[in-house]
Amino acid sequence: MRIETDVLLRQYLDATGEQEVERLLVAIVEGVARPVVQRVVLSALARDAAGAGDAEDVIGDTISDLLRRLRDLREGSAAPIHDLRGYIATCAYNRCHERLRERHPVRNRLRNQLHYLCGHHAALAVWRSGHGAIVCGLAEWQDCAPAPQMAADGVRVAARSDPTAENRAQLVKLVPEVLRAAGGPLELDVLVSTVARLIDLEPQRAEVDLASVEPVTELAADDVMALRTTVRELWDDVRRLAAKQRVALLLNLRDANGNDCLSLLPLTRTATMAEIAAALEMPAETLAALWNDLPLSDARIGEILGATARQVIKLRRLARERLHRMEKTRDTQNLAPGLDSSLTDLALVPRTRRKR
């Protein structure tokens, strides 16, 4: 199946006539991509009642991303795709995780912890299924097919309620017990749902005191335009940095609360995934595989760069210093109201808002 799919992609890239190109594009999107995307999205979002209603939007966004990538491939402006079906599945999973991350930040933190734990604990392992899903299991089970969802639903393991999902010692003990009780490896999202149920994470909802929230006045149209211009200028500055500085800065990009900030670039339409991958000088598939782990630690960035964690920190410091210097060369009066010079820290969100 993979060979047939990749042959279809090669035929599309080699096609010359406009009608033939469109015919092959439709064959890829409708015959290959849409069934894969629908299966991935419906499976991933079905476990989230609030997110299930977003399935059509996520499917549409994933297909749109694929169409742009395929057209970029024909124009020679994107890195090659070596496994089309796997690439499509990965893109669909990433789109789902973006939506779930927006809705459930605490659950997403748990997901990142479990992914890291299974990838770094000697007794555990992480790999990709034939459908592109991330699978977690005991080290001796590596590359085995994941157990069905119902196997995880029946797991009953004693665990202490831990709604903050910050008790790492419990997770180290709990994950192997869950996997053994399930009788086999589990897809990462299934493992997350199971652990979340056992530690009573899902019923927890952050209560917001609306009376304490200061109303925010919408920015005027000219302010919005200035904001977009400023962020675009900042992105242009980032692309002028040395390659290793860009990697050290972007892969560790986080806001004041330590949350991933790089995903704001596609969301604000400042840069596409393809443009970010190009700035990082890595294939889009590699970036897609890293996306759900962002922001990366200095040690992991060092592995990518072939550098030490200390060298990564120095590269990031040099990058920020250069961004500050580039910013000073522009007229600071052009900054949008509500934004300060902390933009060069790439928080990409205002720290204060102007009272009107």
Image: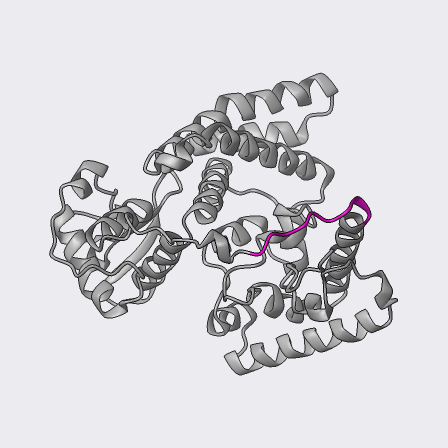
In the displayed structure image, the side of residue 14 where residue 145 appears, left or right: left
Residue located at (67% from left, 19% from top): 20
Residue 306 location, x and y as percent?
A: 54, 73
- Between 300 and 49, which is closer to the camera in this rendering? 49
Quarter of the figure with the N terminus = top left
Residue located at (64% from left, 70% from top): 244
Q: Quadrant of residue 117?
A: bottom left
Q: Main secondary structure of the magenta part?
A: loop
In the displayed structure image, the side of residue 251 where residue 345 appears, left or right: right
How many numbered callouts? 0
Residue 22 location, x and y as percent?
A: 66, 20
Q: Quadrant of residue 166?
A: bottom left
Which region shows up in magenta? Answer: 214-222
Residue 101 visible in the current orientation: yes
In the displayed structure image, the side of residue 77 where residue 111 appears, left or right: left
Residue located at (23% from left, 70% from top): 169
Q: Is residue 271 above or below residue 74?
A: below
Residue 79 visible in the current orientation: no
Residue at the farthest front position: 211
Residue 299 location, x and y as percent?
A: 47, 74
Q: Quadrant of residue 315?
A: bottom right
Q: Is residue 213 magenta?
A: no
Residue located at (11% from left, 49% from top): 156
- Between 66 and 220, which is closer to the camera in this rendering? 220
Residue 8 location, x and y as percent?
A: 55, 27
